[in-house]
Image: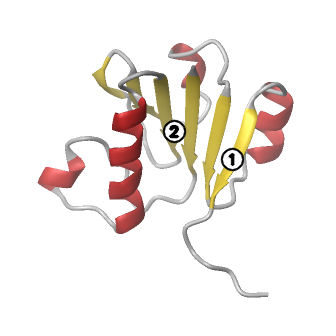
Amino acid sequence: MNILVIDPKCPIPYDNHSIDSSGLGGTESTIVKVVNKLAEKHSVVVTQHLRTNSISPNEKLHYTFPGNESNYMKAPDIIIFIQKSQYVRQLVFKYPKARKILWLHNFIED
């Protein structure tokens, strides 16, 4: 299965090495842990709005910039949006068959 994770608001790009080297917030460190576990059985691409280069810790896990996911997977089966993403509308049309999931880590009151 191909899984695309989109993080449009991270304060700085992060990857597997960030937990040990620079420290991460709770959401970012959880994303790193979750995508590493998913990559044991699936192909996972994480896009981050501030990332300018691509990093591939292994053959099934890639951290890259928005729009570059097609270099690592033909089409995602699942797209996980971290918070609200400005790319939702664009990716709904680009990948209409992908299941879309919103990872909302902050409670928003009515």
Vertical relation: 45 (above or below) 32: above
Between the C-alphas of marks 2 and 1, the distance is 15 Å
Residue at 50%, 16% (x, y): give it.
72
Instruction: Name the mark on residue 25.
Output: none
Residue at 43%, 33% (x, y): give it.
38
Q: Quadrant of the N terminus?
A: top right
In the rendered structure, the answer to whether residue 100 lies left or right of residue 74 reads right
- Viewer-closest of 91 and 109: 109
In the rendered structure, the answer to whether residue 98 lies left or right of residue 74 reads right
Residue type at numbered disc 1: Ile
Q: Are marks 2 and 1 in contact (CB under 8 Å)?
A: no
- Give percent across and percent down for residue 44: 47, 28
- Viewer-closest of 11 and 46: 46
Q: Quadrant of the C terminus?
A: bottom right
| Callout 2 secondary element | strand
- Give percent across and percent down for residue 85: 69, 54
Q: Mark 2 packing: few (<14 Cα in 10 Å), some, or many (20+)?
A: many
How are the residues colored? secondary structure
Vertical relation: 42 (above or below) 79: above
The mark that comes first in sequence, 2 or 1, is: 2
Instruction: Name the mark on residue 101.
Output: 1
Residue type at numbered disc 2: Thr
Vertical relation: 33 (above or below) 84: above
Of badges 2 and 1, nearer the viewer stands 1
In the rendered structure, the answer to whether residue 44 lies left or right of residue 56 reads right
- Give percent across and percent down for residue 53: 38, 32
Residue at 60%, 18% (x, y): give it.
70
- Give percent across and percent down for residue 19: 21, 53
| Callout 1 secondary element | strand
Instruction: Name which quarter of the figure residue 52 lies in.
Output: top left
Residue for badge 2: 47
